[in-house]
């Protein structure tokens, strides 16, 4: 006998309508009834969703649940820690500047040590994602000094994240001085030190970046002065989306 296309239910042939059409029709009706009954339990009720934008997601094999719509401009993201394995999240914005923070200081800091010392220049940033990077850029006025009898002085500067140095130049700059010690400025040289570093803090907690400086030599009253005469130093922090 002929059958239906999708479920292969038996249908009466033309000749069967004469011989046993009633039995064939009953068989067809029974097949339809059984299939509909068996499939009814697999139907997802429309009441599972209750708001515009809701979607249906699996929580386990043969188990579904409602995932409420996210906020405007959020995107659906895989997250194995949630019940449905999905969540709505803010787009990461890879390679884009997500926020900018700036810090300045005019405080005079005199450093007569070859150990790195805080310069009072700092700024704090709270990354929006642990995968973000932070671009640190600074400009700082530094004056190196040394008394007569010496012919050179150096200084170093580094970038520190909280209490960890993340960028340490081998030797930031070194100055050679005039030997005309009759000039009160002969042993002094003012410079504008600047630098940048792309850091990966791997956190969403507030993070402070600062600069530290040191004198290259301390003999003959060797020292450095940061922000002398009210000069302004600045540090800029930029969160870059991964």
Image (cartoon, rainbow, N blue to C red):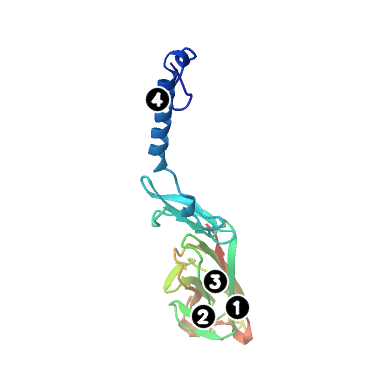
Q: Determine which of the numbered discs, if any, sits on residue 158 in the image.
A: none
- Return the residue at label 3: 174
**Which marked residue is nearer to the observer: mark 2 or mark 3?**
2
Q: In the rendered structure, are the residues bearing label 2 and label 1 in contact, judged by CB atoms less than 8 Å apart?
A: yes
Compare residues 48 and 174 and report the one nearer the observer.
48
Earlier in the chain: of badge 3 and badge 4, it is: 4
Q: In the rendered structure, are the residues bearing label 3 and label 4 in contact, judged by CB atoms less than 8 Å apart?
A: no
- Return the residue at label 2: 119
Q: What whole-number distance in Å separates the C-alpha atoms at marks 3 and 1?
A: 20 Å
Element carrying mark 2? strand
Q: What whole-number distance in Å separates the C-alpha atoms at marks 1 and 4?
A: 91 Å
Earlier in the chain: of badge 4 and badge 2, it is: 4
Identified at 43% across, 31% down, the residue is 32
- Return the residue at label 4: 27
**Which marked residue is nearer to the observer: mark 3 or mark 1?**
1
- Packing grade of label 1 (10 A; few <14, some 14-19, many >=20) is many
Identified at 44% across, 74% down, the residue is 162
Identified at 59% across, 59% down, the residue is 73
Q: What whole-number distance in Å separates the C-alpha atoms at marks 3 and 4?
A: 100 Å
- Return the residue at label 1: 233
Q: What whole-number distance in Å separates the C-alpha atoms at marks 2 and 3?
A: 19 Å
Quadrant where the N terminus sits is: top left
Element carrying mark 1? strand
Indicate whether 18 appears above or below 61: above
Compare residues 19 and 229 and report the one nearer the observer.
19
Compare residues 224 and 126 and report the one nearer the observer.
126
**Which marked residue is nearer to the observer: mark 3 or mark 4?**
4
Q: Indicate left or right for 155 with 234 as reference.
A: left
């Amino acid at each position: 006998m002929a059958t239906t296309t999708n479920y292969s239910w038996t249908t009466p042939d033309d000749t069967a309508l004469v011989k046993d059409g009633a039995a064939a029709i009953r068989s067809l009706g029974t097949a339809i009834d059984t299939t509909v009954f068996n499939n009814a339990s697999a139907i997802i009720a429309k009441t599972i969703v209750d708001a515009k934008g809701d979607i249906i997601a699996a929580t386990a094999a043969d188990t579904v649940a409602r995932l409420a719509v996210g906020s405007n401009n959020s995107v659906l993201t895989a997250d194995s820690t949630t019940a449905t394995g999905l969540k709505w999240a803010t787009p990461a914005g890879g390679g884009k500047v997500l926020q900018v923070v700036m810090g300045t200081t005019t405080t005079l800091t005199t450093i007569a040590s070859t150990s790195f010392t805080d310069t009072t220049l700092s700024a704090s940033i709270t990354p929006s994602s642990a995968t973000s990077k932070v671009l640190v850029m600074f400009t700082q006025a530094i004056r190196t000094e040394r008394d007569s009898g010496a012919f050179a002085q150096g200084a170093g500067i580094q970038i520190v994240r909280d209490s960890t140095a993340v960028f340490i130049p081998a030797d930031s700059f070194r100055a050679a001085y005039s030997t005309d010690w009759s000039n009160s400025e002969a042993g002094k040289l003012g410079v504008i030190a600047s630098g940048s570093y792309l850091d990966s803090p791997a956190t969403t907690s507030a993070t402070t970046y600062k600069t530290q400086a040191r004198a290259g030599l301390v003999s003959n009253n060797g020292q450095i002065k940061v922000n002398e005469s009210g000069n302004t130093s600045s540090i800029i922090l930029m969160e870059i989306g991964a």
